[in-house]
Amino acid sequence: MVRGHCHPGDDYIYGAKSGGEKVSFQQVANRIFCSNLPLSYKGKLICYNCHSGEPSKTSSSKPFAQKLANYMYSLGYKSCQFFGYLGAMDSFAKPGPMGKAIYSRASGDTSEAPLGTAAMATVQFHPEVKTITTPPSRSRFKPW
């Protein structure tokens, strides 16, 4: 699971709403790669970030989760499933119209009515990369 703060179409996630560490989708992928996640991994990579499944509202920039999926595929992760979220995600379960759950909201204001549960706001992304290059050497990357 990839966690951090994000805005629609961003290339980065952030360690805190008011700044913090700024990490690009390439850096996220390189950290995962350097942690020795097997290229044959068939599980889910979830971008649990606000708006990670939304394109930019002001440009043609794709969702963070799509950029991560494309880049991970180019590194050789051909069997993963990639997910992002619509809306601003609650950090923990809260009471709401569907009981106690993690909700997605349009802006992140917790007084705002939720759009639905996190599960309802999940979007799967498929890599758009057409060709794959030879995976790079893990020792070439500096994860941090």
Image (spheres, helix red, strand yellow):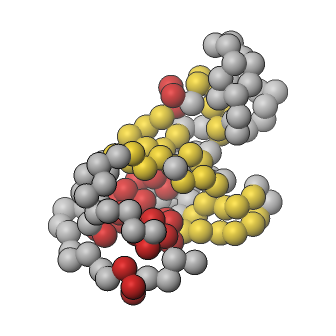
Residue 133, position as x, y percentages in the image: 21, 75
Which one is nearer the viewer's eye here, 14 or 56?
A: 14
Residue 124, position as x, y percentages in the image: 38, 40
Whether 43 is drawn above or below 71: the answer is above
Determine the residue positioned at 51% across, 28% down. 119
Which one is nearer the viewer's eye here, 55 or 125?
A: 125
**Does residue 29 appear to the left or right of 137 in the view shown?**
right
Residue 68, position as x, y percentages in the image: 42, 59
Q: Is residue 14 visible?
A: yes
Whether 88 is drawn above or below 117: the answer is below
Determine the residue positioned at 62% across, 45% down. 50
**Does residue 138 appear to the left or right of 131 in the view shown?**
right
Name the residue furthest bottom: 140
Determine the residue positioned at 26% across, 66% down. 76
Q: Is residue 63 visible?
A: no
Which one is nearer the viewer's eye here, 58 or 82?
A: 82
Name the residue furthest left: 131
Place residue 93 in its image quadrant: top right
Determine the residue positioned at 25% across, 52% down. 79
**Does residue 144 appear to the left or right of 114 in the view shown?**
left
Residue 32, position as x, y percentages in the image: 45, 65
Whether 36 is drawn above or below 92: the answer is below
Place residue 131 in its image quadrant: bottom left
Which one is nearer the viewer's eye here, 41 or 68?
A: 41
